[in-house]
Image: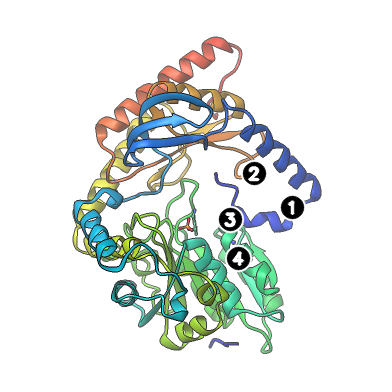
Amino acid sequence: HIRSSHPTFQAAKVSSWSANDKSKLVREVLRMVNDQDRNPYSKVLRTGSATRGTVTDAYKDEEQEAIIWTTNLYLGLNRDKEVIAEAGKALQQFGSGMGTSAAASGMTDLHVTFEKEFAGLVGKPSACLFPTGYTANVGAVAGLLGRNDVVVIDQLCHASIVDGARLCGAAIRTFRHNSASDLEAVLKSEVSPYRTVLVVLEGVYSMGEGAAPVADIVRTAKAYGALVLVDEAHSFGFYGEGGAGICAAQGVTEEVDFIMTTLSKALGSLGGVVAARKDHIDLLKSSSRAYIFQASVSPADMAAALTALRRLREDDKLRERLWDTTRYMRRRFTEAGYDLGTGDGPIVTPHFSDKDTLYAIVQGMYKRGVQTSAVTYPIVENGRGRLRLICSSAHTRDDVDKTLDALIAAEHEVRAQKPSESSRNT
Ligand code: PMP
């Protein structure tokens, strides 16, 4: 072990929930997935691009043209002509699958080049690819730590981080969301020269916030000699120069030991990657079971991710379009009276005080050609809800206007059926 000088049901908080909380959550999820009118995840894309297309409902065979706000394809690179052409060439050149893990010869030039260029962009010497973002977190945390170690995670961190910690048997501690002072209190009681302490946080969380105070948290972690891993799944590609991410934007690339992202969001492909110092990456490649015992990313996915990486590094317009749509949506929805909370990122989440009204609004919007989702307990307080709209460079101002019209019309319809209730958050 090394030593160094925390829909949509993804909260690490689960580890500290009571049995009552957990059974409430399970009942709520079962009610939702068994209720055709409330299940936001039952939609199937027939043709189109995951930001706009022909959608059907898995329960009903009716097609619907929809503007889609439920995917994390922040830069729309999944439909980029060059990305698609390069993926096609790789399919011809290497075939469809690698058939083995990266550790056991499942690498092409594309894989090696991606690792180098990703590391270069985020400002680290070396990188290690995994087949998904989920397994990158599981593989990194479980590969770095053992039973005697401690992982200290922001209470809203993704499930993959919690699962990696559970797998390696390290003690799991959480700190209050975005709180450097709470992290400090936890570290004071956990630091010992006989164990590795790994602090894990996200650059931007997926519930409509802005950038996390990464620099403050990193400084605190370093003052106690902890290692730090930052998950940039919702920030890589559109924060920092050339899309390098939040660590670059906040000037803490050096101090952060591991910079992780997924290839499935801004890069529009499939895979996960962790960048770090060469000896840390060598250690991961030799100790991470998710790296050694799992097939590597397919050649076409790899070529798509590599081409997308080059496109986002060089084309500021992609970012400008995303931020323009984000700002426009935030302004129009705020002017229309919706409470969006304090965030400024591309995930826009109008707050609602009644989750059942919100579910009905999501259905009403879908009828009007707009696919969104509802986020409810445990991500938000029980009974309340947030509509979630994930902006992409592939969306336009016209999409925003149509979406706001659909929301207002759906809300009027629902309120007309339940006149006594006010659904917005006040
Ligand atoms: N980390 C975070 C913060 C995420 O939001 C996600 C996906 N929702 C992942 C990791 C896992 O990435 P992937 O879906 O590409 O496996």
Looking at this rendering, what residue extends furthest in the right direction?
A: 19
Residue on which the image places disc 4 = 153
x 59%, y 52%: residue: 10
Q: Which quarter of the image is occupied by the C terminus?
A: top right
Q: 10 Å neighbourhood of mark 1: few (<14), some, or many (≥20)? A: few
Residue 64 shows in the view: yes
Mark 2 vs mark 3, CA separation in Å: 11 Å
Give the secondary structure at mark 4: strand
Label 3 beta carbon within 8 A of ligand 1: no
262 w.r.t. 337: above or below = below
Mark 4 vs mark 2, CA separation in Å: 18 Å
Label 1 beta carbon within 8 A of ligand 1: no
At label 4, the amino acid type is Ile
Q: Is residue 228 left or right of residue 51?
A: right
x 36%, y 49%: residue: 73
x 30%, y 28%: residue: 401
Residue on which the image places disc 2 = 378
Does the residue at mark 2 contact the one at mark 1 (Cβ under 8 Å)? yes
Whichever of callouts 1 and 4 sits on the residue coming sooner in the sequence is 1
At label 1, the amino acid type is Trp
Give the secondary structure at mark 1: loop
Whichever of callouts 2 and 1 sits on the residue coming sooner in the sequence is 1
Q: Is residue 220 left or right of residue 302?
A: right
Residue 308 percent coordinates (x, y) = 27, 60
Give the secondary structure at mark 2: loop
Rendering quarter of residue 149: bottom right
- The chosen color scheme is rainbow
Q: Is residue 282 left or right of residue 313?
A: right
Residue on which the image places disc 3 = 156
